[in-house]
Image (cartoon, grey):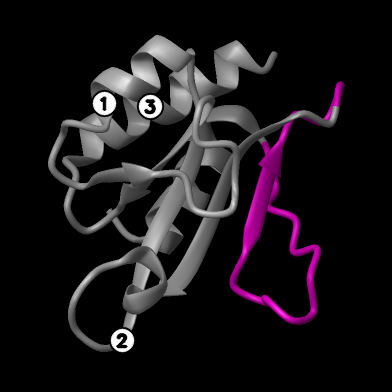
Amino acid sequence: MNYQDVITYVVKEYGVQPEYLWKKYPSFAVLRHPENRKWFGLVMQVEKMQLGLSGQGREDIMDVKLDPKEVEFRQATLGILPAYHMNKTNWLSIRLNEVDSKQICDLIDASYQLTK
């Protein structure tokens, strides 16, 4: 999956439109429930070096909120990182080009349900 695939999935599955809240970060899309305004995801394009990764260029990532035990367990998975710019106990970052699309969708769904 990539950045746009995630946006398409969330719009189709939940009817949620991304919100672009920061002029300084036009590629940061907030995904939140329309009823309670709680965030369940943040899709971003971030420089690899800011994620502690080697190489040049940007990386498509998504932060999702999960139960802390799930966050700890998932961080041992290839393509999963400690949350970028979020609470690392409750959030994790998914490298969208490194994780299977079904697993990404499952994590989005879990985050959506947790924050409902």
User: Judging from the image, what secondary structure is the residue with disc 2 in?
Assistant: loop
Residue 21 versus residue 14 in the image, above or below:
below
> CA gap, disc 1 to disc 3?
10 Å
Q: Report whether 59 appears left or right of 115.
A: left
Residue 32, position as x, y percentages in the image: 72, 36
Q: Are marks 1 and 3 in contact (CB under 8 Å)?
A: yes
State yes or no: residue 24 in magenta. Answer: yes
Three-letter amino acid code at the position of disc 2: Gly
Q: Which mark is residue 100?
A: none
Q: Nearer the viewer, mark 3 or mark 2?
A: 2
- First in sequence: mark 1 or mark 2? 2
Residue on which the image places disc 2: 57
Q: Earlier in the sequence, mark 1 or mark 3?
A: 1
In-image side of 41 versus 4 (left or right): right
Q: Along the horizontal axis of the image, is 11 left or right of 107? A: right
At label 1, the amino acid type is Arg
Q: Amino acid at mark 3?
A: Leu
Q: What label does residue 107 carry, if any?
A: 3
Residue at the (36%, 15%) spot, across then down: 70
**Among the 4 quarters of the image, the one containing residue 73:** top left
Q: Give the magenta part as a residue range.
A: 16-36
The residue positioned 38% from the left and 11% from the top of the image is 69
- Please identify, in this view, whether the residue under mark 1 or under mark 3 is nearer the observer: 1
Q: CA distance from mark 1 to mark 2?
A: 25 Å
Q: What residue sits 24% from the left and 30% below the top?
A: 103
Q: Which secondary structure lies at badge 1?
A: helix
- Determine crowd level at label 2: few under 14, some 14-19, many 20+ residues with C-alpha closer than 10 A: few
Disc nearer the start of the sequence (3/2): 2
Check disc 3: other Cα within 10 Å, few if <14, some if 14-19, many if 20+: some
Residue 111: where, in percent of width, then height?
52, 23
Residue beneath disc 1: 74
